[in-house]
Amino acid sequence: MSAEDRARWDAMYVEGADMPVAALPAVFGGVADLFPRTGAALDIACGTGGVAVWLAQRGLRVQAVDVSAVAIVRARRFAEQSAVPVTFDVADLDAGLPSGEPVDVLLCNKFRNTALYGSMTARLKPGGLLAICVLSEVGATPGRFRAVAGELRAAFGALDVIADGEGGGQAWLVGRR
Ligand SMILES: C[S@@+](CC[C@H](N)C(=O)[O-])C[C@H]1O[C@@H](n2cnc3c(N)ncnc32)[C@H](O)[C@@H]1O
C-alpha cells in the first residue's frame, strides 16, 4: 500500500472517534452459532477491533491485523477495556497474510484483495470457517474496489459453502474447509 493510502486510513481513524462495538457483522448474524468457542482466529483488516474482540469474547485466541497504526492503537485499547486478550499487529496485507498458525476461523469484513483469496483458504485448518464480506458491484455502481458478480463463489468454491449472497453493494460468503 502506498504511504498516501495508509495516511488516508489513519486520518479516517483519527477523525472517526466512535467507540468500537464488540459484534459480529450483521451479514454473518444468521450463522453466528457456527463460530467455534475454542481455537485460533485471524481477523484481517480488523479496523478498530470490534469483530476481533467479539471473537475473543467467544473464547477464540485471536490475531488481528490492519495497515492503520491509528486503528490498531484504538483496537488494543478496546480489547484492554473489554478485558480480553487479542494480538493486534500493524501489517500491510498487500504483502500477504501475516505468518502464523493454521486457524479455525478466518474473518475478513469490508476488505478486498483478490490476491489473498488462495492463501485465505490455505490458512484454514480442515474444518475451519471462513467468513468474508466485500464490496460488490451487485446492486451498486461498478468500481475497481468492488467484487464482480460471482467472485466469492468462484474464489472459494473449494470450501463447503454454508451461506452466501450478493446484493445491495456487498457480497458475502461463509464456508468451511
Ligand atoms: C472498511 S474498513 C473495515 C474494518 C473492519 N474489518 C470492520 O469491519 O470494521 C477497511 C479496513 O481495511 C484496512 N486496510 C486497507 N488496506 C489494507 C492493507 N493493504 N493491509 C491491511 N489493512 C488494510 C483499513 O485500514 C481499514 O481498517
Image (spheres, grey):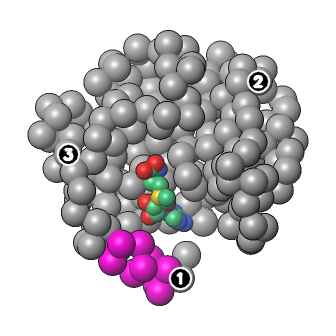
Determine if the C-beta at disc 1 is less than 8 A from ligand 1. Answer: no
Q: Which mark is residue 161?
A: 2
* Residue stretch in magenta: 3-12
Position of 68 relative to 23 (above/below): below
Identify the residue under disc 3.
78
Badge 1 amino acid: Ser
User: Quick one: SS at disc 3?
Assistant: helix
Q: Residue at x 72, y 20 (%)?
A: 162
**Alpha carbons under labels 2 and 1: distance apart:** 34 Å
User: Quick one: SS at disc 2?
Assistant: strand
Q: Are marks 1 and 3 in contact (CB under 8 Å)?
A: no
> Going from the N terminus, do you reach mark 2 or mark 1 first?
1
Camera sees residue 129: yes
In magenta segment, residue 6: yes
Q: Hey, which quadrant is residue 176 in on the image?
A: top right
Q: Hey, which quadrant is residue 167 in on the image?
A: top right
